[in-house]
Amino acid sequence: MSDEEWHGYWTRPDTGATVGGRLVLDDHGLELVLYGSFFVWDGYDFRVGVGFPLATAQTVPVIHGQVIEPMTVLGATCDLPVSPFASAGFEVWEADAVIGARVEPPDDGSEPTFTGVQLDLEMLPVWAGARPAERRHWFGEHRTAITIRPHELASGRLPSGEEVTIEQGAGTTHVRLGLEIAMPVRMSIEGCERSTWVELLNAWLQPTQALLWLATARVGRVERVALRLDQPEDHSPKWGQLWFAQLDPPSGTSPDPSPHDVLFFAADLPGGFAASLARWKEIWSELKHILGPLYARAAAPFAYANDRFYTAIAAVEAYHRYCVTSERDLPRLEHRARVSRLDDLLQDEDAGFRTWAVNAAKPFNRIPLWRRIVEIAGTLEAIGHDLFGDDVEAFARIVESARHGHAHALEGESDFQSGEALYTAADALTWLLRACLMIDLGMSLEVVEERIRRHQRFQSTTRRCRRILGALDDQPTTD
């Protein structure tokens, strides 16, 4: 995330206080540093002394700023104000976000709410089938601003009422030697139920990022986020850019996305763009406990191999639980009958041994992890065979043993000891889940297998997976 800094005058609407200051956005978050004080000291008894930092911080939902353009700071909090007895000092307010527009606070003093969000994401243009995202033209001394009406790439109305549109526009900005023509692609969601900015981002940003990761097998950066503004006048801006602290992959670490990287495009979605997007929202609401951590590990600039491995294992296990109708390996009555039969068969054995065996069998009626992996791979026959050959059960059992061994730091419990093996196993399991989710979106098994098997990243995973399985086969066995 690039650092930003704004200098200007800042106003607290509920008190009318105005002071100078600077707003700083960096990896640590947002800080508003004031050359004065916004703090309200009513109710404090200075005769008994005031300890700093204050036990109860003071929060202001909205602070207006006048920089080059109007700005609004959201959710500013301070628990270490400037002392009222000091002659100089800075007062620092930590903030949640800032909008590049003037947003009025609600009458009840609560957080402002909005009815739409606009997303500019790195992987959006290639997924939407846009033209090249940026072009540069040099016009010499004659600088003429150009604005082209946005071209609609996809649109639709969701059953819940939101209007979703993906458009590619074009416009010019002045640069040192002429003009730069940019062609951004933005996804606009309007007609949402009034929500805070955090609620809107939770409802749309992360699900959209996960959908693009599913479609491209790559994590992209968040280029820009904007919120739909109330427009009291015709000339008022429709969208206000939102800045907030966010975790993005480092820029320039991978080549620009190519159409060859895309497993499916927005135009490929079965049933049309709106219907498929609504279906994805349903999938997300049911599986965000699976997809959220899986995407977060993929998006992290760095994660340990065992961290990725545990996350992929948990996702596969949770997805299988979502798909099956019962967690039990056997129906309850059948399992109970088998335990009873085991008890009868051991009547002539030592009482202690018999009790131990029966007690060991009673609680073990859940589907084991290795079976879950085998069943998922079995529904994706060609993909599973590419990854594991005829060793899918061997792979699944090794993975189960590795999860158990690494979780409890057991020596010699698993043949998966290296970071490469753990990373490759996590990658293979993620490809299985990606295929299942594409089918859940309505794509046929034949289409999913054809597109995944030709993908270069999948082919790389298959080579690494086969190499590791082959190395394990070549290891000498010990009794």
Image (cartoon, rainbow, N blue to C red):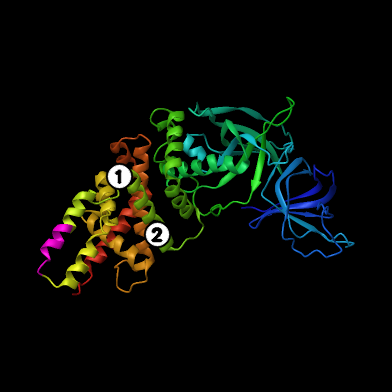
Q: Which residue shows up at 21% across the image and 72% down it?
A: 476
Task: Answer above or below: position of 310 versus 63.
Answer: below
Q: Nearer the viewer, residue 104 or 265?
A: 104
Residue with the mark numbered 2: 310
In the image, residue 345 lies in the stretch drawn in magenta: yes
In the image, residue 467 lies in the stretch drawn in magenta: no
Task: Answer above or below: position of 323 versus 92.
Answer: above
Image location of residue 314, percent across then percent down = 38, 55
Q: Quadrant of the C terminus?
A: bottom left
Q: Residues within 10 Å of mark 2 (few under 14, many from 20)?
A: some
User: What amino acid is found at the position of numbered circle 2 in the picture?
Assistant: Tyr
Left or right of 450: which side holds 55?
Answer: right
Disc ID at residue 324: 1
Per the model, the C-alpha gap separating discs 2 and 1 is: 21 Å
Q: Which element type, helix, strand or loop, lies under badge 2?
A: helix
User: What amino acid is found at the position of numbered circle 1 in the picture?
Assistant: Val
